[in-house]
Amino acid sequence: MNSINSMIENQATLVHVLKQRAAHTPDKNAYIFLEDGEDKEVTITYQELDRRARQLAATLQQKNQQIHNSRVLLIYPQSIGFLVSFFGSLYAGATAVLVSPPTSKKTATRLNGIVEDCDIAFILSTSKHIERMISMEVVGNNASHNGKFSTLEWINTDQLTDGVEAHFIEQEVSADDIAFLQYTSGSTGTPKGVMVSHSNLMANQRTIKKLYNNDENSVFVSWLPLIHDMGLIGKALQPMYLGVPLIFMAPLHFVQKPVRWLKAISKYRGTISGGPNFAFDLCVNKISDEEMQELDLSCWKSAFNGSEPVRRETVERFTQKFSQCKLPADAYMAVYGLAEATLIVSGTQRDKPLLADAETNYMPSGIADSCDVVKVVDPESRLEVVDGAEGEIWVHGPSVAQGYWNRPEATAETFQATLIDDERHFLRTGDTGFARHGSLHITGRIKDVIIIQGKNFHAEDIEWSTNELAAIRPGCCVAFSITNDGQEKLIVVAGVLTSTEEELQQLAKQIRANVYADHQLHLDRVVLIKPKELPTTTSGKVQRRLSKQMYLAGEFTPLLEHQAATTQSDSYSAEASKDSFVPAITESERELAVMWGDILSMPAEKVGMNDNFFELGGSSLTMLELATRLNVTMELLFRYPTINGYLYRTSEYEFPDVASDIYLPPLALDNSLQGKTGISLITGGTGFFGLHFLQAMMQRSQDQFVLMVRGASQEAIEKKFDDAVAYFKMENSIDKQRVKLVQGDLSKKQLGIPAEQYQWVVANVDKIFHIGSHVNNWLPYEGIREINVDGTRSLLQLARTGRKKELHYTSTSTFSPDKDDQSIFLEQDNIKVGDINRYFGYDISKYASEEMCKLARADGIVCNIYRLVWVGGHIETGLTKVGDGFNIMLRILLTIGAYPQGNYLHDVVPVDLMADSMASLIGKAENTNYNVTSQSKESIDMKRIAVMLRNMGYKLDEVSRVEFVERLRNYPIERWDEQCKSYRQLVIRLFEDPTPKVESFYDSSNFIEHMDTQLRQKMEQKFIDSWFEKTINFLVQNNALPTTSGLSYAEEMAQIARWNNTATAYPDSQCLQQMFAYQAALTPDAVAVEFERQSISYAALNMWADKIASHLIAQGVARNQFVGLSVSRSIELIACVLGILKAGAAYVPLDPTYPKASLDFMLEDSNAQWILVDQAAKEKLQAHSNKWLDVNAITEMADVSARQLAAIDAACQSHDLAYMVYTSGTTGTPKGVMVEHQSVLNHSLSLQSSFAISRNDKLLQFSTVNFDSFVEEVFPTLLGGATLVMVRQEHLPDIEKMQQIMRQHSVTVLKFSTAYWHNISDINVEKLGVRLVAIGGEEADLHQYTQWRQYNPTIPLINTYGPTETTVTASLSTLTGPVKKITIGKPIANTQMHILDAQLKPVPIGFVGDLYIAGAGVTRGYLNRPQDTAAAFIDNPFIDNPLSANGKMYKSGDLARWNRDGDIEFLGRSDNQVKVRGYRIELGAIESVIGCHPQIDNVAVVLKEHNRKKKIVAYFSSGVTLSAAEVRNYLEQALPSYMIPNLLLQLPAVPLNPNGKVDRKLLVDMAISASGNADLSMPQRPEDVKMAAIWESLLHVNNIGLHDDFMELGGHSLLVMSLLSEVQKQFGVQLPIHAIFDNPTIAKLTHFIEAQNDAVTTSNLVRFPDLNRGKGDNVRQSQPLFMVHGLGGHLASFYPLIRNLQKNLRDQYNLDITAYGLEANGFKDGEACFATLEEMVAEYVRLIQQTQPEGPYLIGGWSYGVSVAFHIAQELIQRGEKVSAFISIDAEAPHVPEDFDHFIQNNSILNLDDLYEPGTLQTLLDKFGRRFGFVTQADECAKQQFYRFLGYSKQDSEAQIERYSKIAIANIFNARGFNPSRINPMNTLLVRASKSSFNNYINDWHDLLESKMLSALTLNGDHWSIMQDPELAEHLARHVMQAVEQPQATTA
């Protein structure tokens, strides 16, 4: 070996070195490449390297005989392939030019400067990189012009010809030949290539060997890039020189896991390895203590650092940390070098510890080799400086390169410097330093070379990058670097010609972008100044060194200093405030921002979505770290250098290599283990879905269950399971005795189940249920493969090991109470903005898992797949997932304000019901893929959801698919959240495809077929009842949906808080009687009360009240005692109220007109010891005479003495009770509401202000004392000095009398109950002198207001609202002029209105919620009802101290919502909601619609029991007689059928209770009479009852009314056929199909049957119902459309199509069309089928022309009928008529199959009976059934199968089965007559189902059609579904509509 090395040292070139190694040690490894950075070795021996180098050299020689001394460009990744090409170039005598592989089209284009500079002959590269260049359109046929670079020939070194090396011609490679060019900088068009000769390389190899003490025992380990001098010369060529191996890896693998570098040193016992400062810092920062345990670094002799300068901190931290791994203390060494010196210049001694210079603290860079001369020189004097003095480093020696390629001037300046006393040429390094004791110390740089991370850049090149910027004065830019915290920072200072802030900011960003684009360099700072500030020489050149000094001294006055990355957040404020800054919002965006900030040392919140990584401070090395963390290629990051671009990239996406993951290990079944054990394994069983699935399975079977749970111990998983069961409140439904828990982890071997338990599972489990979870969509596939794919494989292997097991694989995102999963929201969570959009499923891993399931099926394993499509959360437990597909789709729809025509929103199902649904499928079918979805009309109807959203206040337009896609594209992408961005791409792909594929993905026909019927009904009901509305509310509250205003939820809450800020000062320490006495003292002589001819002054009233109070006190009445008050309307009544208050007591009103029983209860409940009575009350209260205090007797008593007066009001407190009023309870038992003085006082003063009551006002006292509105009329009046006008009770109904009273007393203010005001809305009270009217008590009717406003145009109307429990009025609205809606306004003073959801969280503006009222008006509660009080008066969560005086809020039981004006809309009682047939119905909503009828005055809707069934009954009053039918017709225009009342009954007047409200109890109890206008709406006649029974059996719906629509109840065209059969059985009448569609209710259908007689038409031509034909002059009429029946001969399948067609034509084109269907013969008793096709066509043509004598005609058909329609069109055209449109729906072109005649002849078939024979029919269907969509089943007879296929019920009689089947058989038989010839309709539409299989479909049709316009459409679905599914039929109708409309435009 030594002799070989001696020989090597004498070699002149590296070519000779390799040849010698190949000759003497051919089998020795030259290089070992760790392909994965760890264990995967790729090796090459010297012999193989020599062979492949010759192979490449020969290839080059063959392509160019003059290759010697030519240049070849090498574009390679880190690999052995690079080394082969490097040596191959040298073998050919060529010069290798080394460049980094380009990462984008732009960086590839920049290589053109190098190509043209050195005249490249060829480019060498690999297949992968060449393909990448082609994809970037840099090379290849699509390459754009990029100079010479795009035209050069590329040589793919992966595809060299074997054996070509034999033709290699040896070259004379001399020491002076240039081995390679190392380009140090240059994107300016003048790049500088350092010429490194073979002699330079050999000299430097000798120097390296000597400095490092390397020998044949050295082992090299490296990660350094081979294209850079340190990696190539120091780490790849030195081992070749020594004859020792190099173990190397890619830089990416090192940065990904720095420990890989040290592990390789430890594993391969490396002796020499190193890198720059950052590599050692990375190891210190990233290698964990655990990873260090595996390292043994005792072998590492030379750990070199090649930075300038070497940082002391780096050395100390690294040696200190890794001394624990036995790193020798003297291993660390520093080296100094540069490309111009080939590589190394000096190095420290490796056997001595590396220490800093004692005087200067600079680290040494060692001594130079003896063959080199290194001097420290004063560059000005060109004299060597003394020892210790600083100067420029100059180098002379054999390693100094030959100069710059083609740059003689630059070469002379840099490479040919001379000293004054030495004529030798020196290399000026540009570095500054000093020498001490022979050791060199680098301190900085003197020349304009900037060294960043080991690479050289010329300052003028960086400055050149700004030349094109017009805002910079030409030549007025300087670049330099400074050292900050041990790191080099690049600065650019520019003199600019602009001064505006916006332009300066933009210019700074453009400078950064240009410098990065040209050099991949990050600018730390851009300093913009006035041009005159920048120092220049006398010749006008910038002075870089002086500029740097001025910058450091702070002598510039910056117009802008743009700093890219700092730890000081305020440095970013200017940028962050700009509109262009888009913050990271979603969780994944924020995670990336944190990652960027960590790597770039800047605050994460300052990283914007559109900020370029490199502009923020990124470099290729920091990008390498980013690529490592994300586990993606650097190329991808170069292509997408912003967070926005990376996360939401839609082009050039690299699909991961999934194919290699789709495999299964071999089968390992144990045949001795047979049969079922009833033991099932469930994964994910502690999640919400898993637990509900477990519960459902327990209910359906007696199986035992093994739950695989992730946890550290058995105790931990048991606790986890128990906690989950408790959290979801499932203790009573989960039988824990049937559950066995095992530890498990999908990411581990054998599922992480302990070995003993695993063997038990293998042998005993017979079913596996995998609740799969696919999350983290934004992460790469590799990031989730371990669990999602490898875990599925492990489960499949378990299914195929031991006992054969079924696997049921569920694909869904599961829910868990574990709060480590931040995608879960619990009800107590306080969720911040931006924290909600985190996780959702990753389709790639689903794909891989499902493909493996298919492999398992091939092995005989039952493997069912359940795709849970768009599952919703569980609102009731406060648990949901914002990332559900439905929720994402809602965000998209509401963001762009539109939804596409058709129905594309499938499936919104609460998780608990979805789990039940999946459980119902188990065992129903094997090896099936289920799309587990509800597919219910109510949950997926897009239009219904749109209506619901509109009702909430959202704006949502129905637009075409094209416009929908355009809106998606045009909406700014940065404004989408993460999930919407990803989902947006899916939606665009689905909708921009002309063939809609979206429906087929959600095909759930097999799920619907197998799931439990009652579960489907539950799904629909739950969605309608609560789920949708609660979900929307939840999403808005958590910022996942916009509010209806577009504000955030928090912003809306702040707005509501402002509306609720009603704080107003008032004398809250006073009592009512004190305030009245104060007013009496102010206005003693003013009239307080008037009653008829009587009146009383304030002073007199006060004295009278004192007298009553004194008497009460004398009777022993004390504070807060209750005193009954039963006095008729009079002045005495007011005096008694005040007297009771003055006595300190509280009054209990006992209206003498109330029922005696009610009065008795109130007295007993209140324990009132005394009752103030007048004569009228004594009769009702005879039983309580012992408590009487006669008010008249008290009045006759003596006046109050001074002593008595002093006792009055002696100790009154504002929180004493003022009164207690009884309300009607829901149970019928009244509840006493206790009201305090301070509440009444706040209310009175607030209303006094709102009513603007003055001493000049007179207010009419309207309400009974028992109604709390009495308080609102009395106290605001008396406390304001106005006059109260009393009215007798019997005068109230007399409107004339009331007007007379108003005139007589000059009343100015009226306060009525709303119901009373409705009755006087046509009275002009303005002319009576009234200035204000207030109403309250119930909802005001807008129609009545409009009428009232006509008579009273100027008077304000105040609408008040408030429950008794909140002191009369809580809010009010003042109405003036016309209004669109009557609201209850805003809260009064010191009152707050909270509209909350079930979790007591405020709902957004516009959303409906429960109304809670807080503030001064909230009363004390209910007397003697602590439970009722606690339920209704709850702690107020919106104040700091709920225990304070006003710390409660009252649950009103009303539904309400805020509007945008801050007013509250009252929406009825929450307990006024009822359920009928599963639908939740708000009776108030029905009342609102009925109340809008122009002739209805008043209405009340109640729920009644009738014939033991719940029915909705509407009572209304009107000035005219209205029939129930008329009102129903009106309602049908505005309400869905399920909301139409079952009974509509007109009354003379809607009854009111004594409080003036609608008496609903009376209406509920009112008997229903069949007389008058009562419309009982329930089947009662025997015929109707019988028909209802048929409907209920077919539809599975109970309580069907006379007027319920068959289709709206769930009927469809196939059920129509069954209905016809049942009607024939039970009514003995044969109805045509159209009878059902024409008469879709029981009432209409039974009437039609009764009218059925011989006159009924028997025509084959059936007119389809004309639905809601258009009205007006602008409606156009189309010519008729004629459609031909299908194979079965009937038209049932056409009705949904025609209905949607008519609707679309009318809505889109204002066009009405009459449609006819042609129905076959044979349906009527005794009627023969058509004998031939000719007979059928002739009859159909006759009927068509009888209806439409002349063309053009619209002809079409479906299935078999298409062929008939074609022959009809053919006949019409032959008669000279035109066919404007021919429509073919899912059918082949008409032709007779070649073997059909053979079949007829061979089976001797003469007639239909022959063909209907069972055996013949079976053969017919087997051979020809697929042509019309029929597939035979082996387990059912052919006749039954065929009959069901035709759409009939299998319960029909044999005779009917035969008759109807023969119609279809006749059609098949008559197909023999098909004889098509080419026709020329003006337009043709060919529609086919995606699941239909036709041979030569398009070609056959083209042979027969010659149309001006021929359109072909494929719809997802099968032969039947495209006609039967209403949603798909609607989509189909739009296309049919276009074909129908086009001829209209043509013929108009």
Image (cartoon, grey):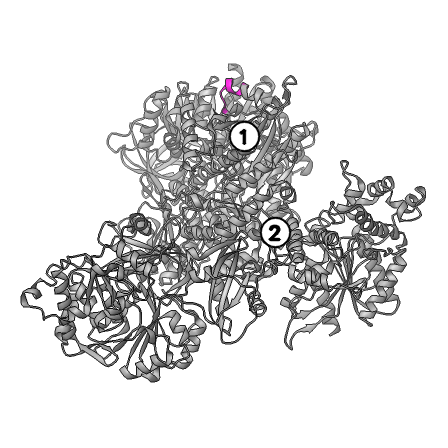
Check if residue 32 falls in the magenta segment: no
Please tell me which of labels 2 and 1 falls first in the chain: 1
What span is in magenta? 752-759
Q: Position of residue 1174 (x, y in %)?
A: 23, 68
Number of numbered labels in the structure image: 2
Q: Secondary structure at mark 2?
A: helix
- Foreground pick, 1406 / 160: 1406
Q: Quadrant of residue 1907?
A: bottom right
- Residue type, label 1: Gly
The type of residue carrying mark 2 is: Leu
Give the camera-side residue of 571 and 1860. Answer: 1860
User: Does any portion of residue 342 appear in the rendered image?
Assistant: no
In terms of secondary structure, what is the magenta stretch mainly?
A: helix
Question: Which residue extends farthest left?
Answer: 1203
Q: Residues within 10 Å of mark 1 (few under 14, many from 20)?
A: many
Q: Which residue corresponds to the image point at 47% horizontal and 53% vertical from the top-left?
A: 1029
Residue 1117, relative to residue 563: is it above or below?
below
Which residue is label 1 attached to? Answer: 791
- Image: 965 above or below 909: below
Does residue 164 appear left or right of residue 1514 in this picture? right
Per the image, label 1 sits on a secondary structure element best described as helix
Q: Nearer the viewer, residue 1307 or 660?
A: 1307
Q: Is residue 914 above or below residue 1584?
A: above
Quick check: 715 left or right of 1433?
right
Residue 1781 lies, in percent from the top left, at 77, 64
Quadrant location of the C terminus in the rendered image: bottom right
User: Which label belongs to residue 990?
Assistant: 2
Point 22% across, 53% down: residue: 1445
* Res. 895 mark: none
Q: From mark 2 to mark 1, how far is it between C-alphas?
A: 31 Å
Residue 625 rendering spot, x and y as whole percentages: 44, 37
Q: Is label 2 in contact with label 1 (beta carbons under 8 Å)?
A: no
